[in-house]
Structures are given as C-alpha cells and as structure tokens.
Image (tube, helix red, strand yellow):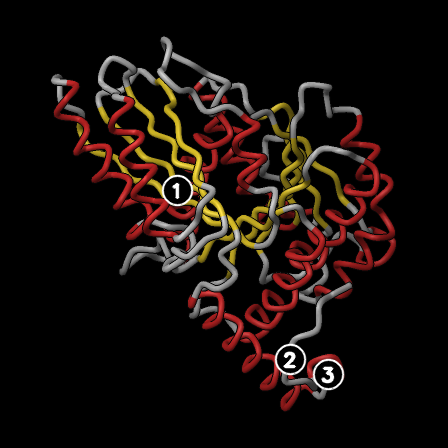
Amino acid sequence: MKVALIGVGQAGGKLSQALAEFDHQMGFDAVCGALAVNTARADLQNLDIDTMLIGQDRVKGHGVGGDNELGAQIMQENATEVMDDLGGRLTTEAEAIMIVAGLGGGTGSGGAPMLARELKRIYDIPVYVLGVLPGQDEGGLYQANAGRSLKTAVREADSLLLVDNDAWRASGDSVAAGYERINDAIAQRVGILLAAGEAVEGVGESVVDSSEIINTLRGGGISALGYASAPASEETTANVNTITSVTRSALLTSMSLPDAVAAESALVVIAGDPDRLTRKGVERARRWVEDETGSMEVRGGDFPMDSEKIAALVLVSGVERSSRVDEFMDRADEAASQEANTTDIEEYATDDLDSLI
C-alpha cells in the first residue's frame, strides 16, 4: 500500500525517517513521500527526509516545551502550509496518509490529531495516525499528554495504530538504545505491512493487497500490529505448522499493544519464499486468529519474499477493549491529577482526561 508519511514532533520525525529508510533498503517502494514537521529547529537538523519548521512566530524554533495544547494550536495555524507542502509530494499513487508521532511530547501529541482532522477535510483517502505511547518510566506530563492525545487521535483519524513504548524495550537498554530498538521494530513491522501488494518476489497463492489493509482498518478505533518469524523448512508441507506457530507468536507475544487480542477485525499476512508457503498453512493461521480474536472478519493472504524464513504479520483493529489501553488511561488520569495538584493547571483538574480538540 503506497502511503505518504508525515512525522510530527521529534519522535515522529525520527520514526518517519526509519520507515522511509527501511522501505528504500528493502526496495518495497511503498513510501511515496516523507515529511517531518516540528516546532523545534534542532530536532529537524539531523534528519535526511524533507523537513518543515512551524510556529516560528510563536516559539522561535525552540519547541513547545511539552505543552500539547500549544502544539495543537500551532498545527491548526499552520495546517494549510503543511498541507500545501504535502500536496506537492502526494502523487496519485498514494492510497493513504500516515501521520507518525510520539503521543507524550508537545508538538507530536498536540499536532498529530489536529493535522489528521484537517487532512480528512481535504483528502478522500484514509488518514491514519501511527502513535507511540510513552514508557512507564517517563514523566507524568508525558503520560497525561498521551492520554489526551490518544482520545483525540481515535476520534480524528481513520485508525490509530498504537505502539506501547514498553512492549519492545529490552531490560538494560539505555534510553537511546531503547528508542532505537523500538524504531527499528516499528519500521520493520509497519514497513512490511505497507509493502503488502507492492513488492512481490514470484507469485503467491493469495497475495494480500492494499484494499485488504484498508478494509481491516475501516472500522476505525485503535489498531495494533504483531510480527514473528522462524526458519522455513525446505519441505513445503512441514511449513504448515511453522506458519501457525509464528502466527501465534505474533498475536500473543509480539504485539505493538500487548494483550490486544479481542478485535473487531484482523488481517494475517504470511511472508516468505512462495515455494515454501502453503495455502493450507495460511488458511489454518487465519482460522486460528478468527477463533482467538473472536472476530468474524479476519482476512488472510501471503506476501512472497526472497527469504529463508517464514514470517507472520498480524494486524488487529478495534482493540479499544484491550486491558493495556485501560491500564494506560488509568495511569494517564492519575498523572493528570498529580499535575493539577502540583501546577494548578486548570485543564488537568478533572478525573477524566478531556480530548485536545
């Protein structure tokens, strides 16, 4: 599926670059343009993708200091310029726009939902938000910001693909190493998902195309993505069990949002050498996901690639009932209450986080 990427904020810019680089290195050609937008000049200087500084008249290129309401205001004031810049890069091939942002900071958490709303007014292709939740060890302001941003993004985007920062961070990682690991994991998973139907090595039995991704996400709400791989056997029949095994691992142990199992819809993509993939294995994996998620709308297909491994990519949509989401929102509410007690900021004086816009 061909997409245009817009990274908003520091984390969004870095992750958009990682996605664009992965797509280029793999030769998928699914990313048809990438733009990083920020209020902080320094955060744009080390990026290789195209960049755009906004809000200079308000913050002089120094960022919004974690104030996501200011981030939303600046994005609203500059939305036309951002869309004009995007319009020059958005080819007729683009099938979706993906806004990428960390939900805990100021520019990304405030600007991403606002930009999604503005883009949906103009374009008739889906507008998705790829949002990254802050880790539990990050400050209370980040938790409160992300809670409000999450609620707003769910309302404004066609789907919010959510990544829990704690899901893939290894114990002992430094902060920098942790973020790099997370960016690499996201780039691999999302990159392969976007590439479905774009880069085909050989001919598969039931190749996934972009319409199946769009239809899986059509219901909106929160979505999550899981991935797992294992060595493929030279005997095709032996790979039936391998396909089932990696699909189980992808859904149960490697989701971008842990415990996101109960879903409204899902898509199973099995990637690997087409000579080693079996329709029986793909169909068995699809039925297993159907039983496990309780969804009657589970699509499945293969993604032929030149590889010695078999990989499963599982996209689930409508996972708002995830216990992980509830746990995070409780944490965000608590953080907002603490912020209200210590800073006397009026907008935090509520037991239920309001949306940003």
Q: Which mark is residue 329?
A: none
**Residue 4 higher or lower than 160, as above or below:** above
Question: Residue 126 sits in which quadrant?
Answer: top right
- Of 67 and 218, nearer the camera is 218
Which secondary structure, mark 1?
helix
Q: Earlier in the sequence, mark 1 or mark 3?
A: 1
Percent coordinates x, y for residue 195 in the rendering: 48, 25
Q: Residue sitting at 50 percent across and 76 percent down? A: 331
Question: Among all residues in the image, which is located at the extreme front?
Answer: 296
Question: Residue 271 sits in which quadrant?
Answer: top left
Q: Earlier in the sequence, mark 2 or mark 3?
A: 3
- Total marks placed: 3
Q: Looking at the picture, which amino acid does disc 2 mark?
A: Asp
Residue that mark 1 sits on: 185
- Of 282 and 120, nearer the camera is 282
Residue that mark 3 sits on: 345
Question: Among all residues in the image, which is located at the extreme top?
Answer: 202
Check the picture and name the quadrant holding the C terminus: bottom right
Q: Residue sitting at 55 percent across and 70 percent down? A: 143
Residue that mark 2 sits on: 352
Mark 1–mark 3 distance (CA, rounded to whole Å): 36 Å
10 Å neighbourhood of mark 2: few (<14), some, or many (≥20)? Answer: some
Which secondary structure, mark 3?
loop
- Of 236 and 66, nearer the camera is 236
Left or right, residue 70 beside residue 30: right
Mark 1–mark 2 distance (CA, rounded to whole Å): 32 Å
Q: Looking at the picture, which amino acid does disc 3 mark?
A: Ile
Percent coordinates x, y for residue 159 in the rendering: 61, 47
